[in-house]
């Protein structure tokens, strides 16, 4: 939700469970209502994104997808774009804090 990229997930519960979902507009409203939480969430997302990006780069170097090098470049480009967007958001938050 932070990067405006489509996502999906599957879950299989091991016992009786309640499932909830969060609409984007409600998520954004919660971030507006709780700016401290917004900042913490974005900073955490930046750190997690750095770790994922690093792991992905290492994996792609070790095991390139043969015959699909154009996809590897495109994926890295998208990852970098998402990372830059998150960094810009964090910088804006820091400026707002000052």
Image (tube, rainbow, N blue to C red):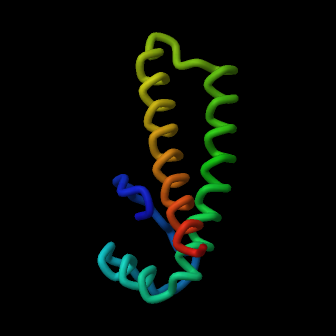
Name the residue at 33% across, 73% down. Answer: 24
15 to the left or right of 1: right
13 to the left or right of 51: left
Percent from the top left, x then y, of residue 77?
Answer: 46, 31
Q: Give the camera-side residue of 30 and 39.
A: 39
The vertical placement of 1 against 85, above or below, is below
The vertical placement of 33 against 42, above or below, is below
82 to the left or right of 4: right
Name the residue at 50% across, 63% down. Answer: 92
Q: Give the camera-side residue of 94 and 74.
A: 94
The vertical placement of 8 against 23, above or below, is above
Residue 62 found in image quarter: top right
- Pick the quarter of the image with the C terminus: bottom right
6 to the left or right of 96: left
Percent from the top left, x then y, of residue 8?
Answer: 39, 58
Percent from the top left, x then y, of residue 37?
Answer: 57, 81
Name the residue at 50% across, 45% down. Answer: 84
Percent from the top left, x then y, of residue 5?
Answer: 37, 53
Seen as rendered, the residue at the extreme front is: 98
The vertical placement of 6 against 72, above or below, is below
- Pick the quarter of the image with the N terminus: bottom left
């Amino acid at each position: 939700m932070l990067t405006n990229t489509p996502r999906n997930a599957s879950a299989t519960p091991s016992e009786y469970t309640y499932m909830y979902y969060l609409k984007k507009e409600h998520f954004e409203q919660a971030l507006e209502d709780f700016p401290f939480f917004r900042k913490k969430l974005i900073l955490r997302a930046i750190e997690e994104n750095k770790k994922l990006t690093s792991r992905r780069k290492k994996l792609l170097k070790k095991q390139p997808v043969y015959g699909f090098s154009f996809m590897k470049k495109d994926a890295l480009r998208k990852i970098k774009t998402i990372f830059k967007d998150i960094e810009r958001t964090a910088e804006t938050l820091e400026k707002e804090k000052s």
